[in-house]
Structure formats: C-alpha cells, structure tokens
Image (cartoon, grey):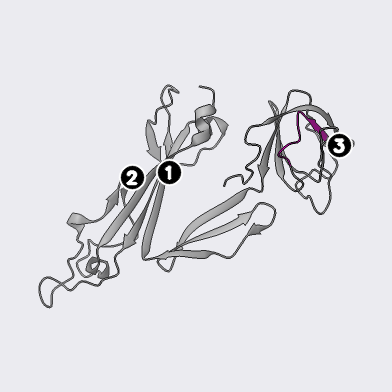
Amino acid sequence: MYGADAERMMPSSITAFNKLSSEVTVDGTAGFKENDLVLLVNPAGCTLGKITQVQPGPQKLQLNPGVSAPQNPPAWGSFPTTYASGDMIMNLGNPIVRTYSIANNKLRVTEGLLQSGANTPQELVDGIMDMRAQYGKDTIGGDGVVDTWNNTEPLNSTEWTQVLALRMAVLARIGNFERPSVSGGNCDATTAANAPTWSGGAFGEIDVATVTSEDRCYRYRVFETTIPIRNMIWRSL
C-alpha cells in the first residue's frame, strides 16, 4: 500500500479541532484536496478520515460524516478520540493497495483504493511458478541492522518497528520443454542437485526431486530483490 499524494509529503500540525463541526484547523491547507484521505495522529492513537471540504482562508479542513465519506466517524461530537493543537495530520491522498498473487502460473496484481475496494486482477507475466517473501528484522539491540529474516507477521507496534526491509523472489519457468538426455529416460533439465533456490531457502511449488516429475523437463530462473523500507530511517532508535 502506498499513498498517492504528491504535494504534501510531510505531516502538518493541527492548530485546533472542533468535534461538533467536524472541523480541523491546520497550519496550512496547501496540498490538501477534497476526497483526500487523512490520518489524524496523537500519542493516544490515530483516526482515518476523508476531507469533504477545504477552506483555504481560515486554514480549515472539513471531515463531515455521510455516505460520501464513510471513513469519518458518524458523530465526531461523541467520538472518544479528540485532537488538539500540536497533534499531527498526514495526507494520504488516495491510498492504493496492490495485491500480488499467482494463478494458473501467471503473476497477477489486483489494484484498488481503500474507498472502493479491490478491482479485477490484471495478469502481468506468464510462467511464474512461485513467489516468496520475508521480513528483515532488527531483533538485537535496535541498532538499525537486520538480524533476522523470516515470514512471521509482526503482532504489535513494537514488532513492526523491528521491520527494516523486505526481500522477495519469484520463480519463473522457461517455456521450452527439454527432452531427456537419454532417449526414453526421465527428464533431467533441472534435477534435485540444481533445484532453484533463493536467499530464503527453497521454492515449494515445483517437484524436481521425483525422477518422473514433469517439472524436471524445464529450466528455471530466479528473480530476487531486497527492498529497504524508506520511512523506517525516520523512526526514532
């Protein structure tokens, strides 16, 4: 998921918050637009809202409840969380959620907005057999260095702050069916001895250990990358 806003990348300061009128006064409305999603943040928690009106003169943002803004609490006046001068508001624009998956040996992506849900999957490339990913975690000392790679999902905010990077890999099958080296024998283009692997270990969606497996009749290629999580460099250590 990533935010699509390109104008206001850093958080803004809240100068006042009027729950009864669903109105947030900020230090500047430049970069905020109607229908942008925003995140109100203070030490006690956060609230996702949707801008229904921008008032440049008085530097105010309206987050009115209603059908067009289901993210906004139905009654800000009775909403338990309140915000005050010095709290933050972050503009997310229209957050885009991309979900990658494999179906029928095709890598595909489903892209949607938080407001409207997921769309129809789009096929990206053929011949993709497997996809793997792991979190890179700073589990020792909090020194900003990855100590552990695993795919165990963090359970709370403390564990999420340990995640510094992701590494992922896809396994592609080369489409040419290769005949066995020995006429009438079993395929041996890819065997257990040279089975494809990645930094996180073995792929599990192909069987090249069984001598009669058709998976042995093809060659494979691994595409792997490590992705630092950019925003983590701004976190306090």
The amino acid sitting under disc 1 is Asn
To which residue does mark 1 refer?
Answer: 151
Looking at the image, which residue sits at the far right? 20
In this picture, which residue range is highlighted in magenta? 24-32
Query: For residue 76, which quarter of the picture?
Result: top right
The disc labelled 2 sits on which kind of residue?
Answer: Gly
The residue shown at (82%, 37%) is: 56
Say if 53 sits above or below 173 in the image.
Answer: above
Along the viewing direction, whichever of 185 and 198 lies nearer the viewer: 198
Chain-order first, disc 1 or disc 2 = 1
Q: Secondary structure at mark 2?
A: loop
Q: Residue at x 37, y 58 (%)?
A: 130
Mark 1–mark 2 Cα distance, whole angstroms, equals 10 Å
Residue position for label 3: 78
Q: Check residue 200 in the rendering and tell me which mark sits there, or answer none.
A: 2
Residue 11 locus on image (x, y percent): 66, 31
Front residue of 30/148: it is: 30
SS of the residue under disc 1: loop
